[in-house]
Amino acid sequence: MAEHLSQSELDYPFKLLEYFNGFRVSKVIFSACELGVFDLLLKAQEPMTAQRIAGEVGASVDGMERLLDALVGIEILEVETKEGTAYYSSTDVSNLYLAKSSTKSVHSMIMYQSQTIYPLWNNLVDAVREGKKPKSADSDQQKEDSFLGIYSSEQEMLKFMGLMDSSWVLDGHDVVTAFNLSGFESIVDLGGCTGALAQEVKKAYPSSSITVYDLPHVVEMSQKHFPQESDEVAFVSGDFFDDDLPTADLYVLARIIHDWNEEKCLTLLKKIHDLCKAGGGVLLVEALLFENRRGPIMAQIFSLNMLMQTDGRERSATEYTRMLNKAGFQHVQVCRTGKSYDAILATR
């Protein structure tokens, strides 16, 4: 670390202190979202005092003023003082990404991070010691199947589905256009959850048929709670490990392979390979580690999260390529998007 830090950091650890307090910064944003601060400011269309905001969301004035000042400090809100009174207003970033009503909102992602991932990370020490999901994190039954924990209740399931939905609002277009997929007439998104990524596929390739394939209760909840932009995306129920898969020219596995150990990954990839005709293939969407495993930091953090929540991990492009080759796919292309998720296209 010393080679990356300036001499001033050795004199006083400003950067380390910033890292130490990172969890508090996250919780400031999470709490403001949960209280509805960003939605209120967007709806108001005018600066508001801490007293007025506190009254609207049912909070103390003192507590709200401190929260708002912290949001100003991290440049998510703006403030102007008139005659000794502070008036707070939203920024373009808060309006676009943090207000629940925005089409680009990541509010659902934030709720999942706050209510599920944040407490889960209290288990990090145990997970590192044991090299697997800690015993305190799940029941014995849930240890056999990671998604029994993730889908342990309807409320938890909806939060996870909201996370996935928000993810593709941000990254969907980039990953489905990383390669030209127009030559694939039929596309199946395996584990496609709410259909948010499938909708991005449909927008980018309107002449292709798109099907979301997921567990029966996921399909049911998707159709009940997540309105579809287009009725041209079909939903089919099934378990991609145990049941027959729909035939397709291209199968999409977006944030799926990282959930499992290599043995299960190979089982699924070989199953897909055997269904593919010549020219058919699979599109993997994952957060790729650098080959030397020294970044990106987000992929490294994701991999730690996989240690605590699933049996999987994040991998490098070479590791995914090796798995795809083992499964029978010989033509593999990699595209780093420069954002949260990257794409790998493998064809038979």
Image: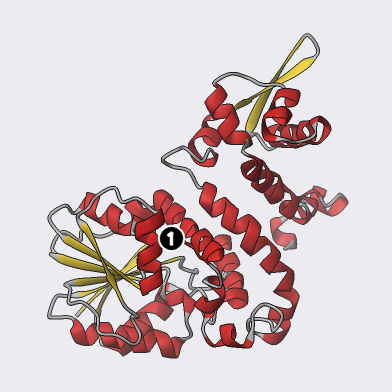
Residue lying at 32% horizontally and 83% vertically, measured from the top left:
269
Asked if 90 appears above or below 199 in the picture, the reply is above
In the image, is 232 to the left or to the right of 345?
Answer: left
In the image, is 276 to the left or to the right of 97?
Answer: left
Q: Name the quadrant of the N terminus.
A: bottom right
Residue that numbered label 1 is attached to: 341
Which quarter of the picture shows residue 277? bottom left
Q: Secondary structure at mark 1?
A: loop
Give the image location of residue 11, x and y in percent. Answer: 87, 50
Q: Amino acid type of disc 1?
A: Tyr
Residue at the limit of the structure toward the top, as seen here:
83
Q: Name the quadrant of the C terminus.
A: bottom left
Give the image location of residue 70, x and y in percent. Answer: 74, 37
Residue at the limit of the structure toward the right, as seen here:
11
Residue lying at 42% horizontally and 88% vertically, measured from the top left:
264
Which quarter of the picture shows residue 50? top right
In the image, is 111 to the left or to the right of 26?
Answer: left
For disc 1, the neighbor class at 10 Å (few under 14, some 14 to 19, many from 20) is: many
In the image, is 145 to the left or to the right of 34?
Answer: left
Observer-nearest of 323 and 68: 68
Asked if 218 appears above or below 128 in the picture, the reply is above
Which quarter of the picture shows residue 168? bottom left
Asked if 191 appears above or below 88 in the picture, the reply is below
Q: Is residue 338 visible?
A: no
